[in-house]
Image: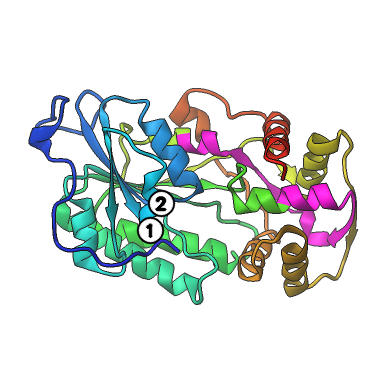
Amino acid sequence: MFINSVIPRLDLGIQRKDLDFPVKPENDNIGTKFAMNIAILGAPGCVGRHLIKKLLEFPHYNIIASYRKREDSESLQHDRLIWRQVDLKDLSSTENFLQGADVLIYLIHSLGAKDFEQLDVQLANVAGQAAQKIGVKKIIYLGGIIPSDKQASPHLTSRMKTGEALASYGIPVGEVRASILLATCSASYLIVYYLAKRLPLMITPRWLNSLCAPIALEDAASVLVGLIPKPVQGHEIFEIGSDIVRYRDLLALCGKAIRGIKNIIIPVPLFAIHLSALWIQLITGVPNSVGTALAEGLRSNTVPSRNRFREVTGRDPLPLEAVLKRLAEEMKAKKR
């Protein structure tokens, strides 16, 4: 959960007069021609750290990154990166964090916390209010694909309501909706990886026949970065994904990437969610609360109704099997 202790009301960030890059006029539209301050809430997480490195490739972006503990900020330093502590439950603290920001990238999700649905909306409302007061010009939010065929799980419903809360303050919001993020730091990928590695033969719930559209973390980050200069109309949805597969096929393909042979998967009709979560915790080490929330989302298809990846990035996403192979090699190198 990305919430931190309160900081004094000090401007600890980048001052416009101190920038080494030309500063855009106050009334100019957002664009890549001028220096721009990008604030990231949720910066210490899996997506956030990858995104920071990607943004630093652009010399006209200055980054304001949130942190919870001091050690979160010590491993990644740069002249155009400043770390600020923030209590996202506190409006004045959040306003201090956003001082000088042109664009806010919102990566907060309190999955695993008690009453995470209510907490997610609460934190999004604080961020939206603060962004409105500071004068942030755009919010980019990474959420999840909402199934159209069935009622969404609490996890996915929370993602949807977070986007709605952020968009309720009159600031343009580009909401990027993705299915499973593939990265060695992603809880969703780690569940798939360890199940595939440790259970060459597995009995699974029949609802693993649901469809998903996994996407590499670097591809998702490319979309987030691509939306910074792109005009966004109101609360605009950008669904993204790579190859569409069934969850059971994703497990089998991950097994193939690990050992060269697909897993044998036997689906059964009755398999309770809480038993699935306990099994996930036992095999993968992912906490039961997180496993339960993620498992509930597997019952529905999470595929883009309109895949906008190419529209934003100008290219196709990385092929699924190639991504799984590379990640398996990375995990092997880490002896995991």
Where 159 sits versus 223, above or below? Answer: below
Magenta part of the chain: 192-221
Verify whether residue 111 appears in magenta: no
Query: In the image, 8: left or right of 108?
Result: left
Q: Residue at 81% of width from left, 47% of height from top?
A: 197
Q: Position of residue 129 (x, y in %)?
A: 23, 62
**Amino acid of disc 1:** Lys
At label 2, counting other C-alpha atoms closer than 10 Å, the crowd grade (few under 14, some 14-19, many 20 or more) is some
Q: Look at the image and tell me whether residue 106 can be seen.
A: no
Q: Which residue is mark 1?
A: 69
Q: Quadrant of the C terminus?
A: top right
**Amino acid of disc 2:** Asp
Query: In the image, 154: left or right of 93?
Result: right
Query: In the image, 176: left or right of 32?
Result: right
Find numbered disc 1 in the image and state the secondary structure of the residue it sits on: loop
Quarter-wise, where is residue 217 in the image? top right
Give 223 or 113, whichever is nearer the viewer: 113
Verify whether residue 205 appears in magenta: yes
Q: Residue at 7% of width from left, 34% of height from top?
A: 17
Q: Residue at 54% of width from left, 40% of height from top?
A: 240
Q: Residue at 84% of width from left, 60% of height from top?
A: 204
Q: Which mark is residue 72?
A: 2
Q: Position of residue 57 (x, y in %)?
A: 37, 26
Q: Look at the image and tell me whether residue 143 can be seen.
A: yes
